[in-house]
Amino acid sequence: VVALEKDRDLLPLLAETFANEVAAYKLSIVEGDALTFDPSIYFGTASQLQTTGYKLPAAPYKLIANIPYYITGAI
């Protein structure tokens, strides 16, 4: 799971709360804004990630979000 969090002040609390998940590589917390975040920069393409050791399925990914309704059109 990659969590995108805009609130810089919340990042330390999230890192502490989910320290076990982060340590187990089950969660990565990324500071960013959903309106300007480019997932291809963070994730690359599936083929690029395969060469770095990530085992990604060829299937499409799902984006699950808890965002304000008013920005959904822009995303």
Image (cartoon, grey):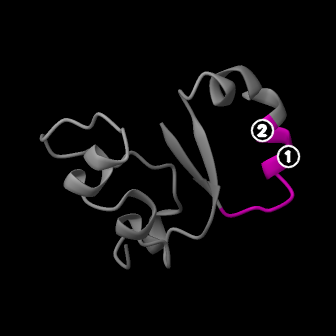
Q: Position of residue 56 (x, y in %)?
A: 26, 38
Amino acid at the residue labelled 2? Ala
Q: At 71% across and 20% down in the image, what residue appears?
A: 20
Q: Is residue 42 above or below residue 15?
A: below
Relative depth, front residue between 29 and 75: 29
Quarter of the image where the C terminus is located: bottom left
Q: Secondary structure at mark 2?
A: helix
Q: Residues within 10 Å of mark 1 (few under 14, many from 20)?
A: few
Q: Position of residue 28 (x, y in %)?
A: 59, 41
C-beta proximity under 8 Å, tags 1 and 2: yes
- Whether 60 is drawn above or below 75: the answer is above
Tell me where residue 65 appears, x and y as whole percent: 45, 49
In the displayed structure, would residue 30 be above or below residue 56? Answer: below
Quarter of the rendering containing residue 16: top right
Q: Position of residue 18 (x, y in %)?
A: 72, 28
- Residue 9: say if magenta: yes
Kindly state the secondary structure of the residue where label 1 is placed.
helix
Residue type indicated by callout 1: Pro
Q: Which one is in front, 33 or 59? A: 59
Does the magenta-highlighted stretch encompass residue 50? no
The residue tagged 1 is: 12
Residue drawn at (34%, 75%) of the image: 73
Q: Which of the labelled discs sits on residue 15, or is there none? A: 2
Residue visible at 50% across and 44% down?
2
What segment is highlighted magenta in the picture?
6-15
Instruction: Categorize mark 2 by other alpha carbons within 10 Å: few (<14), some (14-19), many (20+).
Output: some
Q: Is residue 65 above or below residue 35?
A: above
Q: CA distance from mark 1 to mark 2?
A: 5 Å
Along the horizontal axis of the image, is 47 left or right of 10? left
